[in-house]
Amino acid sequence: MNSLLEKRLTAPTISNAMGVISKTLKYAHRRELIRSLTQMPKSQRTDKARGWFTASEYWRLYRQSQRPIGKTYEIDKKIVNGKTSTSRVNA
């Protein structure tokens, strides 16, 4: 774990690496490739809070994500004097 700290990795990265090592050792133990398991050090994980969106910003993101890109839609179709007129919107 010291070598991970020396590389100046973030706490979540170190925690993930230790989790992979722990699972690998447990697997090796179950397969009887090693006789015993060692105690894994506890990491003192302190996450850095990230920014968040307000409710209105989430709503705007949601509405924007529902809009197809590069599609054309018919929004109004009229027949006048036997001729068809269609309004289209490009999204």
Image: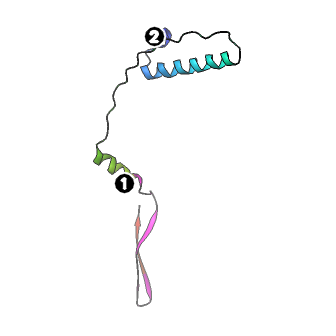
Where 81 falls versus 46 (above or below)? Answer: below
Q: Which mark is residue 6?
A: 2
- The magenta segment is 65-84
Where 53 falls versus 76 (above or below)? Answer: above
Front: mark 1 or 2? 1
Label 2: how many Cα within 10 Å (few below 14, some 14–19, many 20+): few
User: Which quarter of the rendered picture does the C terminus lie within?
Assistant: bottom left
Q: Amino acid at mark 1?
A: Arg
Percent of width and height locating residue 71: 46, 62
- SS class of the residue under badge 2? helix
Q: Amino acid at mark 2?
A: Glu
Q: Residue 80 magenta-drawn?
A: yes
* Quadrant assignment, res 74: bottom left
Where 86 falls versus 33 (above or below)? Answer: below
- First reached walking from the N terminus: tag 1 or tag 2: 2
Identified at 58% across, 9% down, the residue is 38
Front-most of residues 18 and 34 = 34
Percent of width and height locating residue 72: 45, 65
* Quadrant assignment, res 83: bottom left
Q: Residue 71 magenta-drawn?
A: yes
Identified at 44% across, 67% down, the residue is 73
The total of numbered circles placed on residues is 2
Percent of width and height locating residue 69: 44, 56
Disc 1 versus disc 2: distance between alpha carbons?
45 Å
Percent of width and height locating residue 26: 62, 18
Q: Which residue is mark 1?
A: 63
